[in-house]
Each structure stands twice: as structure tokens, then as C-alpha cells.
Amino acid sequence: MDSKIDFSSYSLEELYSSLEKIDKDIYPERAKQIEELIRLKEAESPEEINTIKNIGEKSTKSDRLVAAIIDGALGLATLIPVFYYVGFDAFKEPSIYLIGTLFIYGVFTTLLLHGYLLYYYGQTIGKNYMSIRVENLDGSKASLITIYFKRMLPMQLIGLIPSFGQFISGIVNPLFIFGKERRCLHDYLAKTKVSYTDT
């Protein structure tokens, strides 16, 4: 006996999820009912449509920006001991030794802060907060090797080149996200994308 489900009490997000999972061949009437309710709720609350984030869907530019700001703030916090130890004057004309030391320190602090999340979930702290992760183009979670050595490290190395490298890594790289694919330059290099997840 086919039990009745009251879909009218479902939220728009729950209706989307139900329509995605339902077998339309076995339950054509239910599917039709859900589709009709979705149309009604979308008409009643159009502002809610843009707030729904489906798992596997590419992240919006704004959510990636918030995640980047969080990670950037954490990164700056790790530099406080460096500024305290070597002083600001050392950065006016940094030596090769200082540049190399800072690079190694940056790798260490990056893995210390984000290593666990990167390895198990494909996320930094900021991405975890925004429920987004780095994925391969087939939708699978990107490995730590892919994320760090193919995605992050190239930009860090390019950024060591005065002026030109910093322009590429700091300006050109993020500007790529305004393209149709919503992927930064480092995403193209690593063949990755950033999508919503349930973690």
C-alpha cells in the first residue's frame, strides 16, 4: 500500500532533495506533486532560491572569498612571531636566507593549520567553515598531494619572484574565478574545482 507523504510541509531545500532522490518511474504522481510545490515555493520566496547550496555544486565566488579571508587572517597571525623576531626592517630588503626561511616556515604553518582537514576532507579551515572543499574535476575529493603540490605550492613559488611573480599569484590567479568556470588559475594548474560538501 502506497503511504501518503505530506510534502507541503517540506522546505524548498528538502523538496529539491526529494525530487533528486525520488524514482519518477515508480512514483510519477509524487514527483509531479513535488515539482508543483517547488514552483509554488519558488514563486512565494524567490530570495530563498539563491541561498540553497547543493552538494557537488561549484562554490559561489562570495563563499570562496570568505573562506580565503579566514585563511588569510590565520596566515597573517602565524607571521606575528616572525615580525617580532626579525623586525619589520628586515623585510625592506630581504636576504635570500630570509626568503628561504620564510618559505619553509610558510609550508610548516600551512600544514600545521590545515594539514588534517586537507588530508581527510580536502578543506582548509576557511573552506571547512563555508562547507566547501577542493575536488578533482570528476567530483571526487582532491588528495593532499594534489591540493598542496599541484595547487598551492606553484603559486607560493611564483610569488617568490619579485613584482611579476607576486602580480601573477596575488592578482591574476584570483581574477580567473570571474570566468565562466568559477575556477582560479591554481585550479586550472591542478585540474581541480571548489564545490559544496556536507562536512
Image (tube, rainbow, N blue to C red):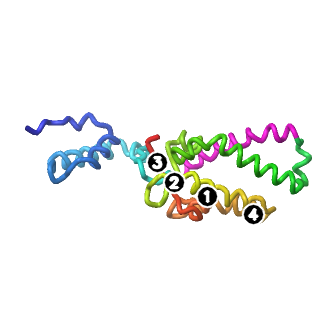
First-in-chain label (4 vs 2): 2
Q: Identify residue for label 1.
A: 151
Return the x and y of residue 6 as percentages of the image width and height.
20, 35
Q: Identify residue for label 4.
A: 165
Q: Amino acid at mark 2?
A: Ala
Q: Is residue 107 left or right of residue 141?
A: right
Q: Identify residue for label 2.
A: 142
Return the x and y of residue 110 as percentages of the image width and height.
67, 45
**Which residue extends farthest left?**
1
Q: Which mark is residue 196?
A: 3
Predominant SS along the magenta part: helix
Nearer mark to the viewer, of 4 and 2: 2
Q: Which mark is residue 163?
A: none
User: Would residue 67 be counted in the magenta stretch?
Assistant: yes
- Residue at mark 1 to residue at mark 2: CA–CA distance: 10 Å
Q: Which of the pair 192/163 is nearer the observer?
A: 192
Return the x and y of residue 141 as percentages of the image width and height.
48, 52
- Identified at 79% across, 49% down, the residue is 102
Instruction: Tell me the crowding category of disc 1: few under 14, some 14 to 19, or many 20 or more residues within 10 angstroms, Cα based.
Output: many
First-in-chain label (1 vs 2): 2
Q: Is residue 86 left or right of residue 195?
A: right
- Residue at mark 2 to residue at mark 3: CA–CA distance: 13 Å
Part of the protein shown in magenta: 61-85
- Residue at mark 4 to residue at mark 3: CA–CA distance: 30 Å
First-in-chain label (1 vs 4): 1
Q: Is residue 77 left or right of residue 120?
A: right
Instruction: Tell me the crowding category of disc 4: few under 14, some 14 to 19, or many 20 or more residues within 10 angstroms, Cα based.
Output: some
Q: Are marks 1 and 2 in contact (CB under 8 Å)?
A: yes
- Residue at mark 1 to residue at mark 4: CA–CA distance: 15 Å
Q: Amino acid at mark 1?
A: Arg
Q: Which of the pair 68/44 is nearer the observer?
A: 68
Q: Amino acid at mark 4?
A: Gly
